[in-house]
Image: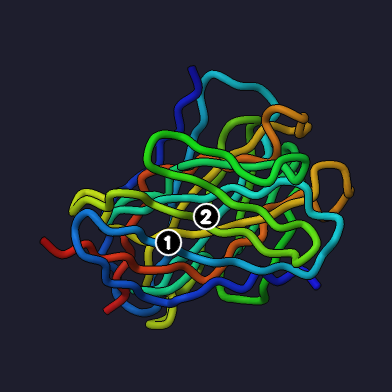
Amino acid sequence: SQTIHQWPATLVQPVGSPLSLECTVEGTSNPNLYWYRQAAGRGLQLLFYSVGIGQISSEVPQNLSASRPQDRQFILSSKKLLLSDSGFYLCAWSVRVASINSGNTIYFGEGSWLTVV
Amino acid sequence: QQQVKQSPQSLIVQKGGISIINCAYENTAFDYFPWYQQFPGKGPALLIAIRPDVSEKKEGRFTISFNKSAKQFSLHIMDSQPGDSATYFCAASSSFDFGNEKLTFGTGTRLTIIP
């Protein structure tokens, strides 16, 4: 079965410090990978989307970047955090080619709470 | 055209009652409509999903009703229980519309079931 791991679970960082959140998926090959952000009590904002190694699409301009160094590894980074970067960050994956049965189901990780102080 | 509009933003239902959350979409290319359930501090998890070739899908106490002509779909939770208290997201995507295969999410509904 497929699993998704995301870490760290909780992070408190000062303004201006760097950020690295890591996500790995097991039990599947060549998945689509996603980073979402969820502000407190708000909806899901898609930040980055990747269909393969080194292929990153940015959905919104921001202070963050993403990289996919390996097929099942997705990293969210920042060189200098802003207060507005605080939130709940979710890594997710889906099968590369949707099918009639699977649709475009996205499977989320447990999330990482980032507080920038 | 990519938006999915979800209502209400929050909902309070008495235990044993029926919870109803509604979503509407514009993109007629959408052909997959999942609902996600999210508990506080956790990632969203797939609850139930429907394709437009059927008007209703039921799994236990959860039912999706789909109205293709109105471009609307809704989640019904029968016999609502306190354990159903969570945030619910509807979503939509087009399986074979290259570039639009990503899920588009609604803004979420915070459901509270009171005893």
Residue hosting label 1: A19
Residue under the image location 37 percent in, 53 percent down? B38
Q: Quadrant of residue A62?
A: bottom right
Tag 1, which chain? A
Q: Element at badge 2?
A: strand
Report the residue at 43% width, 63% height from top.
B20
| Mark 1 Cα shell of 10 Å, populated few (<14), some (14-19), many (≥20) | some
How many badges with numbers are in the image?
2
What residue do we see at 60% from left, 21% from top? Answer: A28
Tell me the kind of residue under disc 2. Answer: Leu
Residue B41 — which label? none
Q: Is residue A26 above or below residue A113?
A: above
| Residue A97 placement (x, y as % from top left) | 78, 32
Q: Secondary structure at mark 1?
A: strand
Question: Quadrant of residue B92 in the image?
Answer: bottom right
Q: Nearer the viewer, residue B95 or A76?
A: B95
Is B20 above or below relative to A92? Answer: below
Percent x, y for residue A20? 44, 54
Point out the tag, 1 or 2, that comes first from the N-terminus: 1
Q: Amino acid at mark 1?
A: Leu
Image x and y of residue B19, in percent: 37, 61
- Label ID, residue A76: 2
Which residue is more in the foreground, A91 or B104?
B104
Q: Spot the residue most to the left.
A: B115
Q: Position of residue A79 (x, y in %)?
A: 50, 68
